[in-house]
Amino acid sequence: MWPNIFKIVGGSLVALAVLWALVLGWWQSNDYEPSRLDLALYLGALPLAIVGGYFLLKGFIEHLKAPQAAEMPKDAPLDDMDPLAIASAKTSAAERLFSIRLLNAFVVTAAGSDGESILAAITDGVRPSPNPSFTDSDGFPVFLAEVADLDHSMIAEEFEGESRFVEFLAAREDIKRALALLASVVDQAGDVLSGHLNQPKTQPALNVVWLIPNNWRDLDAAVLKAWLKKRYWSDLSDTCLSIKIIPVSHEALALKQLDEIILDANRDSGRPIMTLILGMMSSVDGNVVETLDANGALFSAKRQDQSVPGEGAVALLLGHEAALGIDEQEQATVVSRVALGARDKPLGSGGRIRGKTVEQLISGLLDVTGVEHSAITAIVADADHRADRLTEILDGLGSAFGHLDPIEDCSTIGASCGALSPIGGLVALACAHTKALADDAHVLLISSQHPIERAALLVSPPLAQKSTLNSANT
């Protein structure tokens, strides 16, 4: 203590002496006769202000350098005597273990019309090719992931009588193509769905959740609902059929809707309900391509770090375990809750590409489900051809997934199908469903196509998931 005091006092006196010497020397060199005010100001107040300011600045710097005290947790610990708090905590913990059965997945993209063909295209390195029907601002053909031989000529006729809607369709090639793609997957799902709905004892209700691109908001939702009901379920009463149309802007929001469906199905598992998630999109349209090009977001020879326009549709048939028979459960995969998060900064904004957010989502997901890292045999992501997307995923997987081959075991849907926002995550889920059944193993789905938003979920074969949840509950 005393050495520090002597050091401070001695240093202050030396500083005062130096300041006095400088002031007196300046007065003497200029033959200046100071007044009493000058003596008080320059030999008293000024040196004290400088020395005091030095110690004040030093103290402030030391305060900034000092480690911050650990913050107390904001949430108070649960009171053992508060039954409501205990019940709420138990409910939250139980809800994290909720899951739903994925009975069937129907999908169509430029890379294939089912999950198996899409995964095969990715493995074979199939990539979108330039389409001479579309050119960029430099006059070069645009790379497009276009579904070949798609006939959408009848779509406008099916809305006959809705003049405003037909006029809107006439100006939007992308919407006509997307509706035609949707019709193709719902046609596939029709026979399978009728088998589930026509139960001998109790007919389950059908809950249709139709996710549309955010730029479809100007369309009349009532017209779309009427078209879908008339085309497929005109024989179902309103008590047995619910159609909800939800605009979504990106992949993570679509997966968030899936998570809401999982929550609702488990909270009200006593009701026999089948849920059909529908999604479709198309960027194969001259106006869409022109807008992407003008915004610098179109893949080209100059901008290879941008997206390739794609198109596709997906239909996912879901049901809670309590509403399904044993045979149905044995043929269905089990989909976990969706873990959602966001990066600190957009991908592509510069600096080292880190997968911290992806790593945290995966870690939390596996902790809840009780699945070991070594039990994951494949990764399916909605990412496209851009290297930074795959780099982030691989960094997030880290050494814990060292048993996976980054090429053979990590399938990025967008590499072959093009950009499929906002349904890319759902298309990836359809492929993960196929992979989990084929390999009889856990498949991890990662959504990383959006610049910031991230999501992850686990797709498991029935027997593996049942044993996992039993061990997690013990």
Image (tube, rainbow, N blue to C red):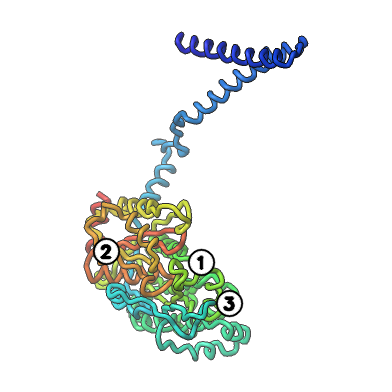
Question: In front of the other: label 3 or label 1?
Answer: 1
Can you tell which mark lies on residue 249?
A: 1
| Residue 260 falls left or right of residue 296 | left
Q: Identify the element where label 3 is drawn.
A: loop
Q: Point out residue 399 in the picture as x, y percentages from the top left corner.
A: 26, 52
Residue 15: name its quadrant: top right
The answer to which of marks 1 and 2 sits earlier in the sequence is 1
Residue drawn 76% across and 11% down? Answer: 33
Residue position for label 3: 219
Alpha carbons under labels 1 and 2: distance apart: 27 Å
The N terminus appears in which quarter of the rendering?
top left
Q: Disc 1 residue type?
A: Ser
Q: Identify the element where label 2 is drawn.
A: strand
Alpha carbons under labels 3 and 1: distance apart: 15 Å
Q: Is residue 470 above or below residue 67?
A: below
Whether residue 208 is visible here, answered yes or no, is no
Q: Disc 3 residue type?
A: Leu
Q: Is residue 274 above or below residue 452?
A: below
Residue 305: name its quadrant: bottom left
The answer to which of marks 3 and 1 sits earlier in the sequence is 3
Q: Point out residue 187 in the picture as x, y percentages from the top left corner.
A: 39, 84
